């Protein structure tokens, strides 16, 4: 009699405990793996011979799921991402109603994720901004079919970080560094000359679009664009501007820190950039941080703080500002706070307990709804200090929402998760692709590490759950396949089972192919065996707990960031 695939059965191990990582070929996990091996991503999406198809072919990427909408939505995401690659050479466009390539998003954080799927298109997108630099050093805030535009600066994710990460992710790209470094250095000089009119060392906002905060109450009674359509000028009749802007100042600090890394890689002295980065960080806290409120605010031209709690905090943290204790406090008091920024479907753009909060997601608004750009930027705020379990917890409902949605929008309704403004929006598409790799896929990291994460989409709500999922990537000539059901995860390398571990862990593997760490991704402790080949290593990992391994597969140390659950 033919047996239908079912969930993994826990069988007794040698010590009598249930061993959920023991092989069981009847599981739905292996049905997902077989489905993955029988499917052709390029044929399914119709992308063979396209710019994105060429990139996907180089990565060997694939996904299959048993049950639920995730498999179909993943292939739809790729097909719609292909619509956002345009031009000769093809570069990433923002998508939706936005025709062009924006510095704050398309050319930075979007490109960081795109590089894992279409590295050449990501590289060409970065070079686009250097190619259109103005004679005075200003990099355009966007490039469209009509040409480059300079009416605002619109900086959020630091460009230099994206360039540096692309260099490291692709195994080294000194030509990219050599071409982008002088352009970014000239733009930094422009910023210092034109956006520090008050002599504070902070970076000034001249208009709402400088930070991309359309409709935000942060910029009430401020113009959308800089004076006379030129980012070099502030409206002299404004009673409030220029603002000393925390997110722009944090951007400059992070930008300068990464320019130091690039300078060092090119054989130049990184010292001056490091000093400038430190000065920007000092100015950020001196002028834009209120110790009593424990919040970052703009400071207007009168010297008053503009007390709007906005996603500025998320942006500042994503620029690497703050130590571990500062980050934990920010999560506890704001980002994981369900009266402030943690809605059920992601991080809101204005704190929910602010009287000006507006949840309307049907328009281009940063006055409240969950913006997919904020979600795309959020890993950089959580992961550097080890808060991976919180990020996974906060992301899961948004992942379910997009898996069940009829489009990839700019905004989600924070209460229902319903898709809002626009469609075929590349930040939403890329967040969906990124969230799947980050939660239940294979994620290549700058520097050559690989993350294999075991939070399969088996517990997503609203009809989005799958019984099992399998994911594939080719890295350095080796074919990796991860398969996960509701209880266990297997990783196959070149067709042979290599790793197995319980749901709720992430395994980090170095460029040498050796296991470097196991990380607790679940809000609760998870115990089981990590199987590396024929070797079983018993482990118990709490949320955010990281167990380090040596080359022999022995645990050599443990650490953990305190887990911050949702609360108020």
Image (cartoon, rainbow, N blue to C red):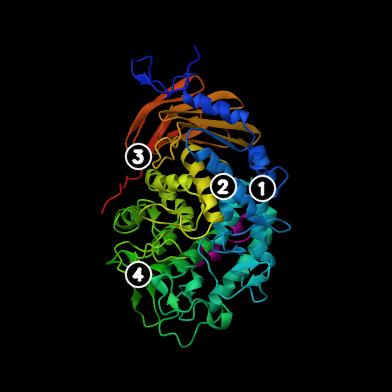
Q: Which residue is mark 4?
A: 308
Q: Which residue is mark 2?
A: 77
Which mark is nearer the camera, 1 or 2? 2
Q: Residue at x 68, y 68 (%)?
A: 132
Q: Give whichever of discs 3 and 2 has the lower sequence position.
A: 2
| The quarter of the displayed image where residue 139 is located | bottom right
Tell me the SS state at disc 1.
helix
Q: Which residue is mark 3?
A: 543
State the extent of the magenta-drawn residues as a range. 260-276
Left or right: 560, with 318 as reference point: left
Quadrant that contains the C terminus: bottom left
Q: Position of residue 231 (x, y in %)?
A: 56, 77
Residue 554 visible in the displayed image: no
Task: Name the disc covering residue 52, or none.
Answer: 1
Cα separation between marks 1 and 3? 36 Å
Left or right: 362, with 135 as reference point: left
Q: Give whichever of discs 4 and 2 has the lower sequence position.
A: 2
Q: Residue at x 60, y 46 (%)?
A: 78
Q: Position of residue 550 (x, y in %)?
A: 48, 31
Q: Position of residue 69 (x, y in %)?
A: 49, 39
Q: Position of residue 318 (x, y in %)?
A: 45, 57
Cα separation between marks 1 and 2? 12 Å
Q: Give whichever of discs 1 and 3 has the lower sequence position.
A: 1
Along the line of sight, the residue nearer the viewer: 478 or 208: 208
Judged from this view, the residue extending furthest toward the bottom is 237
């Amino acid at each position: 009699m033919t047996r239908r695939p079912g969930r993994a059965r826990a069988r007794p191990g040698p010590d009598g405990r249930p061993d959920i990582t023991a092989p069981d070929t009847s599981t739905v996990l292996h049905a997902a793996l077989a489905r993955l091996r029988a499917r052709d991503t390029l044929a399914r999406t119709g992308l063979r011979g396209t710019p994105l198809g060429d990139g996907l072919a180089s990565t060997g990427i694939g996904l299959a799921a048993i049950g639920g909408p995730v498999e179909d939505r993943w292939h739809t995401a790729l097909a719609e991402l292909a619509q956002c690659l345009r031009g000769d050479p093809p570069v990433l466009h923002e998508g939706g109603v936005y025709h062009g390539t924006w510095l704050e998003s398309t050319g930075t954080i979007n490109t960081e994720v795109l590089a894992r799927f279409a590295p050449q298109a990501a590289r060409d997108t970065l070079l686009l901004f250097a190619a259109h630099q103005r004679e005075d050093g200003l990099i355009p805030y966007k490039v469209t079919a009509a040409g480059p535009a300079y009416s605002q600066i619109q900086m959020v994710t630091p460009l230099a970080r994206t360039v540096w990460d692309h260099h490291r992710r692709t195994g080294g790209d000194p030509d990219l560094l050599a071409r982008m470094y002088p352009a970014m250095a000239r733009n930094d000089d422009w910023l210092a000359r034109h956006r520090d009119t008050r002599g504070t060392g902070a970076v000034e906002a001249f208009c709402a679009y400088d930070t991309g905060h359309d409709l935000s109450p942060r910029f009430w009674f401020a113009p959308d664009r800089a004076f006379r359509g030129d980012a070099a000028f502030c409206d002299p009749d404004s009673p409030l501007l220029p603002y000393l802007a925390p997110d722009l100042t944090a951007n400059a600090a992070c930008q300068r820190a990464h320019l130091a890394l690039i300078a060092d890689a090119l054989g130049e002295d990184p010292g001056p950039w490091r000093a400038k980065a430190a000065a920007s960080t000092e100015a950020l806290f001196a002028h834009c941080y209120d110790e009593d409120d424990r919040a970052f605010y703009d400071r207007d031209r009168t010297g008053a703080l503009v007390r709007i709690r906005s996603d500025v905090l998320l942006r500042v943290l994503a620029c690497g500002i703050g130590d571990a204790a500062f980050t934990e406090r920010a999560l506890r008091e704001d980002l994981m706070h369900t009266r402030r920024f943690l809605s059920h479907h992601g991080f809101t753009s204005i704190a929910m307990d602010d009287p000006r909060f507006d949840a309307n997601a049907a328009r281009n608004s940063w006055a409240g709804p969950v913006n997919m750009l904020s979600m795309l930027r959020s890993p950089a705020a959580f992961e550097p200090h080890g808060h991976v379990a919180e990020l996974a917890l906060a992301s899961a409902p948004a992942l379910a929402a997009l898996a069940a949605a009829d489009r990839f929008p700019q905004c989600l309704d924070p209460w229902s998760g319903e898709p809002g403004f626009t469609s075929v929006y590349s930040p939403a598409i890329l967040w969906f692709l990124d969230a799947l790799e980050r939660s239940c896929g294979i994620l290549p990291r700058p520097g050559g590490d690989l993350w294999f994460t075991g939070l399969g989409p088996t517990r997503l709500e609203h009809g989005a759950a799958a019984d099992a999922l399998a994911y594939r990537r080719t890295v350095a000539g080796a074919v990796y396949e991860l398969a996960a059901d509701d209880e266990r995860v297997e990783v196959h390398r070149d067709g042979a089972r290599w790793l197995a571990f319980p749901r709720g862990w992430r395994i980090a593997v170095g460029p040498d192919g050796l296991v470097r760490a196991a990380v607790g991704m679940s809000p609760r402790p998870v115990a089981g065996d990590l199987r590396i080949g024929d070797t079983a290593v018993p482990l118990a990992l709490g949320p955010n707990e990281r167990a380090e391994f040596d080359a022999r597969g022995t645990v050599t140390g443990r650490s953990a960031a305190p887990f911050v659950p949702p609360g108020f």
